[in-house]
Image (cartoon, grey):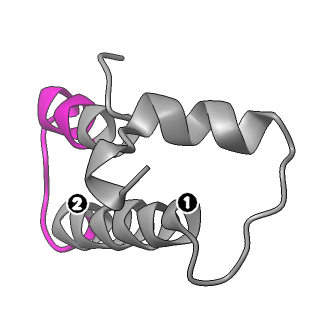
Amino acid sequence: MNNNQIDIDKFYKYMHEGKIVEPSSTIANAFHKFSQNALKITTELNNKYHTPEEIVKFFSKITGGAL
C-alpha cells in the first residue's frame, strides 16, 4: 500500500486498532501528511476572526468529514 492509497478513514481505522507505527512506514508518512495539513488549517483558523460557519468548515477539513 502506498501513501496515496491511505485516506483519512483508513488512517483512523489503523490508529484505532492500536497497531505500532514504524518510522518511515506508509502509515507514518500518512500521519505526517495529515498532521501537516491540520497545522496549516489551524494556522489559518487562528490568524483572524471567523464566523461559526467558517469554523465548522475548518474543522470539517481537519477531520475529513462533516460536523
Give the residue at x 18% y 74%.
47
Per the image, the residue denoted by label 1 is 27
Magenta stretch: residue 17 in it? no
Q: Secondary structure at mark 1?
A: helix
Q: Depth check: 52 or 39 in front?
A: 39
Q: CA distance from mark 1 to mark 2?
A: 27 Å
Task: Name the one closer to the observer, 51 or 6.
Answer: 6
**Does 9 sit left or right of 33 as displayed?**
right
* Mark 1 burial class by Cα count in 10 Å: few <14, some 14-19, many 20+: many
Residue 52 sits above or below residue 67 on the image: below
Q: Give the label on residue 8, or none.
A: none
Q: Is residue 10 above or below residue 37?
A: above
Rendered location of residue 11, percent (x, y): 53, 42
Going by the picture, which residue comes out furthest to the top? Answer: 66
Q: Amino acid at mark 2?
A: Leu
Residue furthest to the front in view is 1
Residue 30's image quarter?
bottom left
Mark 2: give few (<14), some (14-19) or many (20+) Cα within 10 Å: some
Does 52 sit left or right of 10 as displayed? left
Amino acid identity at mark 1 = Ile
Left or right of residue 11, residue 3 in this image = left
| Label 2 secondary element | helix
Q: Nearer the viewer, residue 44 or 51?
A: 44
Task: Please provide the residue range marked out in magenta.
Answer: 46-58
Where residue 45 appears, as percent x and y from the top left, is: 22, 60
Q: Which residue is mark 2?
A: 45
Q: Is residue 49 magenta?
A: yes
Residue 8 image-quadrant placement: top left
